[in-house]
Each structure stands twice: as C-alpha cells, then as structure tokens.
Amino acid sequence: MNDATGFFRAVVHAASRVLRPHRSQVVGLGVACLAATAAHAEPASWFPDPPTTPHYQWAGTACAHCVTLTPPANWRTMAVLAGVPAVRFLLDEHTADTAFAAPPDVVVVSPALLALDRCQQAFVVGHEIAHIARRHYDEDAHAVQIMSERRGLWTNRGEQAMQLLDGDMGLALKLTVHWQHQEREADWLGSLLAAQTSGCELEFAAESFLHGDSREGGVLASHADNPQRLRDLTPFRASARLLAEGLFTPIP
Ligand SMILES: [Zn+2]
C-alpha cells in the first residue's frame, strides 16, 4: 500500500491470524434475537453515542478492485445496531488480512473471513463495523493533525491529514497507544454485536477466533497479543451472554 491511509491500515490490521479448524456453533436463540433487532432498526441502547470527533472527507478509494458483497443478514443487523446501517461490504479476493475497515463506510472482507464459522465471522465483522461507527479514521486524522501542530482548518481531507504520517516514525509511535485503545474498543463492541445479532457468546466468537498465542509484531503494533485481547474482553463476558440469550434485546 502506498498512500498514508494504506500505511495506517497496514499497521492497524497487520496481524497475521492463523486460522485453524473450529467448531461450527450457531445458537438457536440467535435467530429470534436477529428477527427482533432487525425489526427494531435502531442503534442498540448499549452502543456508545456517536462520537463528537470532527468529520473529515474521505475519497473512499481504499479498495478499488474489490467487489460488492451481499452480506448475511446478521452483518447488516450489526451495522444497524451500531448506528451505521449504510455500511457497505466489499470482498477483496487478494488481501492477506481477514478483514479491515476503510473510511468512511466500508468493511472489506477476504475469502479467509468467509471460511470462518458464523460466530467468528460475526466477531470479526462486528469489530470492523465498530471502527466505522466510532469513526476511528476521523479520530486518527484529527490526532495526526493535532500532534503535528497543524491546527484549525489546515485540511478537512482525511487522506491528506494521514499523509503527515509518511516517514514520521516518531508520530506513528505517538499514535500507537491511541490505536491500541481503538482496537480494544472495537473488540468489545464487536463481541457484543456478535452476541446480540447472532447468539454468539465470547466462547464461540472472540475466544474461538483469538485462541492461541499469535502475536502482532513490530514496534507499531496496534493489536495486543491474543492472550491480552482475551483478558481485555473478560469484563464483557456476562454482557455477551445476556445479549446472546436475548435478555438485553430492546422490545420493538
Ligand atoms: Zn481493528
């Protein structure tokens, strides 16, 4: 990837995930839960309010060679629950990533993602939807601009702001902690979206996908290693179970 956004996303989503055979697990309650949430068609009451981060303009050309993908119903419902029902889903036949989010409204998935079982897919796609809903790309553009002391209206174009990262290892290091926070947020939101829409408790979604000790290398790693990601998700285990069982589902 040559542009700044590409550089950034390559950093954020550079984790090489080793895919192993997994149990196919679909919880029956998820079907009723999905029907209820689809009819409701509003953001989930537990989902954070939209961020107040300034809006940047994005060219939206991160994956020009991708093809449009008709998503499974539970992916679309996750987007609704996250307050971003217009998210577009694209398929990249050639990416080494499992999935990634591209500003302003795209989730790109790979054949490797489609090979996962339903709950693992829901966690990964929910994680990427969370990046879109929380406008982490706008946060990045804003943070880069502030940290570069280019304040005010220097630019409202996201790609131009992110170009400030080009060749600036010091700035990228400053942003690493910021990216790690975003990844933790996407993990717990993705886990709860998977639980509510697909009946997937942590055991069958995040824990199943993140098992093993694979680690993201490099000084600019944004994801923690898998054991740490799972420890960070522990406080959300009970909430995921309740959502998976339909006990937190808003009444339409
Ligand atoms: Zn992420």
Image (cartoon, helix red, strand yellow):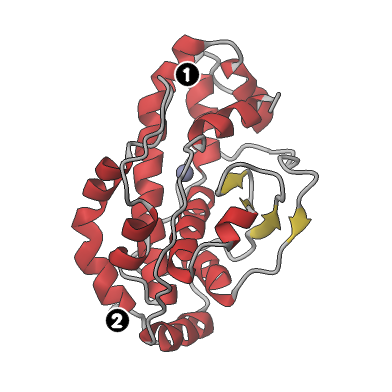
Quarter of the rendering occupied by the N terminus: top right
Marks 1 and 2 sit apart, C-alpha to C-alpha, by: 41 Å
| Residue 220, horizontal then vertical, whole percent | 43, 23
**Earlier sequence position, callout 1 versus callout 2:** 1
Task: Decide if ligand 1 comes within 8 Å of the CB at mark 2.
Answer: no
Find the residue positioned furthest to the front: 21
Answer left or right for 213 relative to 67: left
Label 2 SS: loop
| Residue 207, horizontal then vertical, whole percent | 31, 57
Residue denoted by label 2? 245
* Residue at x 37%, y 81% (from the top left corner): 27
- Specify the amino acid type for callout 2: Glu
* Residue at x 54%, y 65% (from the top left corner): 79
Where 169 sits versus 198, above or below?
above
| Residue in the foreground of this view, choosing between 96 and 101 | 96
How busy is the neighbourhood of tag 2: few (under 14 within 10 Å), some, or many (20 plus)? many
* Residue at x 37%, y 51% (from the top left corner): 187
In the picture, the disc for residue 172 is 1
| Residue 243, horizontal then vertical, whole percent | 31, 74
- Specify the amino acid type for callout 1: Ala
Answer left or right for 211 relative to 163: left
| Residue in the foreground of this view, choosing between 238 and 142 | 238
